Structure formats: C-alpha cells, structure tokens
Amino acid sequence: MANRCIIYQQNGDPTQVLSAITFPKLPSPSPNTVNLKFLLAPLNPADVNTIEGDEPVFVGGNEGLGQVVEVGDGVEGLEKGDWVVMDKPQLGTWSTSRNVSFKDVIRLPSAGLTEAHGATMTVNPTTAYNMLSNFANLHQGDWVIQNGANSAVGQLVVQIAKERGLNTINFVRSRDDMEPLVKHLEGLGATKVLTYDDLEDRSLRGKIKEWTGGKDIRLALNCVGGEPTTAMAKLLGQDSHLVSYGAMSKKPLSLPTSLHIFKNLTSHGFWQTNWTKTHSRAEKEELIVKLAEMMKEKKIKAPEHTIETDEEATTKIRDVFAKVAQGKFGKKVLLK
Ligand code: NDP
C-alpha cells in the first residue's frame, strides 16, 4: 500500500482544509532517528482546535502508536519491532510512516496490550491519572466527583479511581434511554451515576451525605464547564480542588466567591501537554509503564472505537470531523 498522510495546507475548518495525500517510501533513517510505521492514530477533540488555530502544523495528528521499522546510527534504547508513543506534541501521526528523532518517542512495553490501548495511551489515560494524583491527597475510600463522566477521559477516571479504591460520583447529560449508559459506567466501576438535571434536585445534597457517610468530597473534575459545573462545585467539602480540563459545553465557568472564602476551594486547570513539557523523561516513562500495567491487567479498557481505513480518505476524514463538530461521534475514531 502507498504511504499516505492527512495534511492541511492552511488552518481552518477541518471539514474544508484536510486532505489525504500519498508520499514516497522513506529513505533509511539518518543518525539518531528511527523510521516508524504508524499502527493506529486517534482523532481527539483537541485536534479540531489545532487545525482551526494559527500554528502552522501541516501533517495532522498528535497522538498515535508507532512501530520502529528501521533504526539509524546512534539510536539508543530502541530496536526494530518496538512499539513507541509520541513524546512531543504534533509529530504528525495521521500518516502511514514517519522519520522521527529517537528522543521524541517513548518505548511502550507492548506485551499484552492491544493496538487501540497503545494508540490512545498518551492523552486520555495520562490526563485521568494525573488529575486523580496531583491535586488532592486522596486515600482509599475517599470520594471524587466529575462531569462529562462518559467522555473517554471520564471513563478512565472511573477505572483508575476504582483501581485506587476511590469512590466516584459521575454526572452525564441526560438522554432518552439512560439505562445502558448507567450500566456501562457502573460496569467500569462507577459508584454512582447521575445527570446534570439531578444537580437541580434539592434532595441531592442529603443523598450524597448518606452515600459518603458525611465525608467531604475534596476533588471535582470538570470536562464541560457552564452551569452544571457551578452546581457540582457546590457539592465539594472543605479544602477542596476543582480541576478543569475541558470545556465541552463551550460555556464559561462561574464559581460562587463563598466557596473560596468559606470552603477554601482552589480552582485549577490541567493540560496534559504542559505536564509532558514540564516533566522528565523518567517520570513520563514511569507513568506509561504504570498505565500499561493496568491495561494488561484489564483494569483499564481500551475506549470504544471505530477504525477508519477507508481509501476515500479525504472525504472520509472530513466527514468524521463534521460529525465531531456536531458532537455526534460517540466512539473514539482511530486512523489506520
Ligand atoms: P470524548 O469525545 O470521549 O467525550 C466528549 C464528552 O463531552 C462526552 O461526555 C459528551 O457527552 C460531552 N459533551 C459534548 N458536547 C457537550 C455539550 N455541549 N455539553 C456538555 N457535554 C458535552 O472526548 P475526550 O474524553 O477525548 O475529551 C473530553 C474533553 O477533555 C475535551 O474537551 C478534550 O479536549 C479534553 N481533554 C483535555 C485534556 C487536557 O490535558 N486538558 C486531555 C484530554 C482531553 P454526551 O455523550 O452527552 O454528548
């Protein structure tokens, strides 16, 4: 099969500017570089912003699973056949192959992992893990509250919290048939699943007190912003932390001043890209090994996904982005 990649020659609406092109076979790698074959590369919500934005990145794709096919002189710690994930943003993973510096990728211990696990390793699982670990000092039996709980990140929060013995209260948008979603999240380990409408119910506070045995909830994770987040923050206890990582509703976040004054609430933002830039290679490798271990032990499932291999790639990729823009694509899309 010919080498292909998804490019954009100017920033703009992904449904207009993305195109699939073919390119010749890569030459042998120069010193300190490796040639990768990409096995799978996801399409994440943040990719829309990158393509729309003003940074001149021309081969799309930030995350992906590569396999080393050829090693240049001077490369350390990588061999032909190794699986790798990206250690640098926007390397252009929506491509069949690519030549990269060996320092820009991290070897993934691949035994027992699926390609879908590997391809979705560096953005969502790391985000979920870090948000649960880096803001509040939580112990087994503590409670965490989150919205957007059915997002890929939210589902990872549920699973990693479960593995750590933490309880989760999970808010999602209501839908006609709630039962399958509730069952799905409970199956992953969610302690309670509620809707944003439940946040308006005056009896909710009492119910939560019963569930938690009166224990303060000290960590809330915010994927959506807007009113439901304000209401969720009011459920937090003393010395708590609200961590915002997404703004899916596109609505601003407003917090009552009283939460800061009387409950000593701290509101943070979290951006995994910044964590990656500000942490050492050893710290990143350690996190990836930890997550890979949880995946192998089936404590973290790969996200529900569809794999796109369509030869009509330009039409297909634009179509996928049109659905993403309308919030209609329920499963993670992985490009092959
Ligand atoms: P998914 O596509 O898996 O999930 C999207 C979620 O957003 C679903 O829960 C969906 O709920 C919800 N949603 C969509 N539209 C709205 C709306 N108008 N109002 C309320 N909820 C809405 O996405 P990911 O898990 O991959 O990413 C989720 C968010 O996290 C994105 O904003 C992404 O950019 C961000 N993110 C941030 C990171 C960071 O480092 N800060 C890292 C990774 C992700 P429904 O099913 O009801 O439509």
Image (tube, helix red, strand yellow):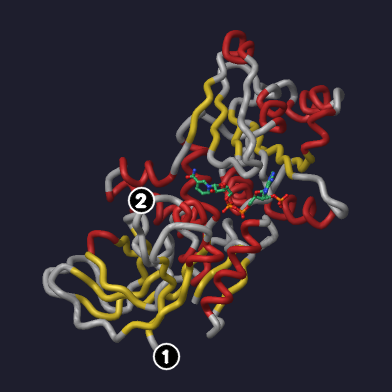
Decide: is 100 above or below 126.
Answer: below
Per the image, the residue denoted by label 2 is 286
Residue type at tag 1: Met
Q: Is residue 244 left or right of residue 249?
A: left
Among the 4 quarters of the image, the one containing residue 79 = bottom left
Question: Could you say where residue 125 lies in the image, as x and y percent from the top left?
Answer: 51, 52
The secondary element bearing badge 1 is classed as loop
* 3D distance between C-alphas at marks 2 and 1: 36 Å
- The residue that appears at 32% across and 64% down in the rendered structure is 107
Q: Which one is in front in this view, the residue at disc 2 or the one at disc 1?
A: 1
- The residue that appears at 61% across and 9% down in the rendered structure is 262
Give the position of the N terminus as an image quadrant.
bottom left
Question: Could you say where residue 265 lies in the image, as x and y percent from the top left?
Answer: 57, 18
Q: In the image as oriented, which residue stretches furthest toward the bottom?
A: 1
Question: Could you say where residue 119 lies in the image, as x and y percent from the top left?
Answer: 47, 66
Per the image, the residue denoted by label 1 is 1
Q: Nearer the viewer, residue 318 or 144?
A: 318
